[in-house]
Amino acid sequence: QVHLVESGGGSVQAGGSLRLSCAVSGRTSGGDTMAWFRQAPGKEREFVAVIGWSAGSLDYADSVKGRFTISRGNAKNTVYLQMNSLKLEDTAVYYCAACPFAYCSGNSNEYDYWGQGTQVTVSS
């Protein structure tokens, strides 16, 4: 069992920054991959960023490369998403997800636990 709780969402003007956090409890000794996904109104959930058990294994969606950074806390029980230069199209509910392998892709089907989501709203 894995419990994920996101925080840090909110409203920000375009060009601003937000830092999302995901507190992870439960199955953390097995080397989970962690990822962020997002879902905008009327759209399907999409991959944002992934970090493997080894923090050197990272990947990002093209739409956020160079603006977003995913990282883990030292104890690996927190995952962060630093979002800079936010755009209107970044508005969405952001979800943290866990995959039970050392590295997983951006395919949401590989992830077996999900947080409840946190809303990010970017305005002009």
Image (cartoon, rainbow, N blue to C red):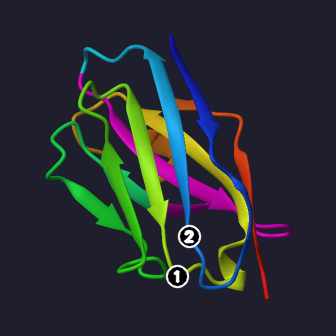
Q: Residue at x 59, y 78 (%)?
A: 86
Lateral position of residue 15 relative to residue 88, left or right: left
Point out residue 105 in the picture as x, y percentages from the top left corner. Answer: 34, 54
Lateral position of residue 101 relative to residue 80, left or right: left
Q: Is residue 38 magenta?
A: yes
Q: Which mark is residue 17?
A: 2
Earlier in the chain: of badge 1 and badge 2, it is 2
Q: Which residues are magenta?
A: 31-48
**Foreground residue, 46 or 65?**
65
Q: Residue furthest right?
A: 42
Dot 1 surroundings within 10 Å: few (below 14), some, or many (20 or more)? Answer: some
Quadrant of residue 77 in the image? top left
The reply to whether discs 1 and 2 touch (Cβ–Cβ < 8 Å) is yes
Judging from the image, what secondary structure is the residue with disc 2 in? loop
Q: Which mark is residue 85?
A: 1
> Which amino acid type is marked by label 2?
Ser
